[in-house]
Image (spheres, helix red, strand yellow):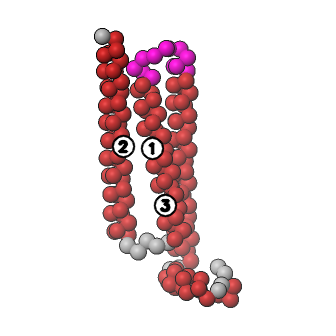
Amino acid sequence: MSSPSNLDSSSEKDNSPLEERLAQFPNEKLVQEVISVWDEVIRIEQELANSRQRTRALELELASMDLEQGDGPTIIDLEEQLRVMKMRCGQLEAKLENEKIRRIDGTDNSDSRLEELQKENARLLKVEEEHMILILDMESQIDRLISSLKDS
C-alpha cells in the first residue's frame, strides 16, 4: 500500500474512509476476498469469450448456409439467433465492465441492496431478451407475409 506521504491531501481525504474500513479486516480475509473477486472476473471473462466463440460459429454457419442455399426460413432463423447472441454478448460485456468498476470502487455499502439490484438487473435482462426475441419473430413473420403477398 502506498504511504500517506506519497499522496496529496485530496486523495488522502478520499481514500481515508476506505483505508480505515479495510484496516478493520484481517489481511487474510482481504486476500480471500481479492482471490474470490478475481476468480469471478475470470469466470465472467470466460463466459464472454464463449459467447463470442458461439457468435463466430453461428456467423460461419450462416455464411456456409448462404452459399449452399439461395434462401429459406433457416437463414432468417439463424440471423435472428445471431442478433440475439450479439445482444447477449453486449450485455455480458457491459455486465463485466460494471462488475470491474464496482469492484475497483469498493463501494458496496449494503450487500442486500447489491443483491436486490442484481436480481432486478437479471430480471430486466431476461425481459429485454424475451422482448427482443418477440420483436425478431414478428419481423420474420412480417417478412414472410410480404414475400407471400408479392408471390400472390
Circle 3 residue: 99
Mark 2–mark 3 CB contact (< 8 Å): no
Q: Earlier in the sequence, mark 1 or mark 3?
A: 1
Local SS, label 2: helix
Q: Amino acid at mark 1?
A: Arg
Q: Disc 1 to disc 3, how far (Cα)?
A: 16 Å
SS at mark 1?
helix
Tell me which amino acid carries mark 3. Glu
Is residue 135 shown left or right of residue 38? left
Which residue range is magenta in the image? 64-75
Residue 56 appears in view: yes
Query: Which residue is depicted at the point 53% across and 46% down?
Result: 48
Residue type, label 2:
Glu
Q: Residue at x 53, y 61 (%)?
A: 100
Q: Position of residue 68 (x, y in %)?
A: 53, 14
Residue 26 circle label = none
Query: Mark 2, mark 3: which one is toward the viewer?
Result: 2
Reply above or below: 46 against 23.
Answer: above
- Residue on which disc 2 sits: 129
For marks 2 and 3, give the CA distance: 20 Å
Q: Left of 86 or right of it: where is 123?
A: left
**Residue closest to the far right:** 6
Is the residue under label 3 in contact with that under label 1 (CB below 8 Å)? no
Q: Which mark is residue 88?
A: 1
Please say if the residues under marks 2 and 1 sit with CB atoms less than 8 Å apart: yes
At label 2, counting other C-alpha atoms closer than 10 Å, the crowd grade (few under 14, some 14-19, many 20 or more) is some
